[in-house]
Image (cartoon, rainbow, N blue to C red):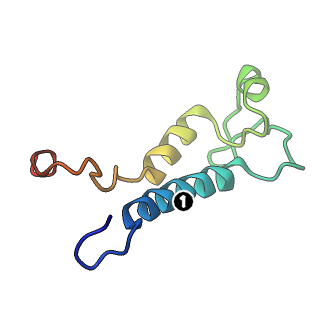
Amino acid sequence: MAGGWAKDGAIQDQIDSTVNDAVALARSRMGDENNTKSLSECEECGDAIPLARQEAIQGVRLCISCQADDDKRTAKPAGFNRSGSKGSQMR
């Protein structure tokens, strides 16, 4: 039951949309399934990627340092508070 201007199921639609966006982002970061060979050198800085990392992460393209920088750069804020409690929304 929605209230105001929202249609029935609007909250679930918003949740579904958020989940679908997150899945699409994760899939886009996985890369091409046909090209899963790990690189021996980082494509950003050119430093060597340790063999253990190459074997652990199929298709790795960045060293640990560049991957950490990329993760920080692409991190998204938490988004909306969907708990429905006014008290939790005012914190």
Give the mark count: 1
Front one among 60 and 77: 77
Counting from the top left corner in percent of width and height, residue 42 is at 69, 41
Q: Is residue 30 left or right of residue 65?
A: right
Q: Nearer the viewer, residue 2 or 83?
A: 2
**Image height of 61 relative to 22, above or below:** above
Q: Nearer the viewer, residue 57 or 91?
A: 91
Q: What residue occupies the far bottom of the structure in this picture?
A: 5
Identity of the residue drawn at 48% across and 53% down: 74
SS at mark 1?
A: helix
- Identify the residue at the far front of this view: 1
Tell me the quarter of the picture where residue 58 sits: top right
Residue 1 lies in what quarter of the image? Answer: bottom left
Residue 88 image point, x, y percent: 15, 45
Q: Is residue 15 left or right of residue 39?
A: left
As drawn, is 51 to the left or to the right of 22? Answer: right
Residue drawn at point x = 44 percent, y = 56 percent: 15
Q: Is residue 42 left or right of residue 51?
A: left
- Residue 42's place in the image compared with 86, above or below, is above
Q: Position of residue 5 (x, y in %)?
A: 27, 79
Give the camera-side residue of 36 and 66.
36
The answer to whether residue 22 is above or below residue 63 is: below
**Identity of the residue furthest to the top in this view:** 52
Label 1 packing within 10 angstroms: few (<14), some (14-19), many (20+): few
Name the residue type under label 1.
Asp
User: What residue is at 57 percent from the left and 40 percent from the top?
Assistant: 67
Q: Which residue bears the numbered disc 1? A: 21
Please say if 8 is above or below 57.
Answer: below
Residue appearing at x 73%, y 38% in the figure: 60
In the rendering, at what x and y percent does residue 61 appear?
71, 43
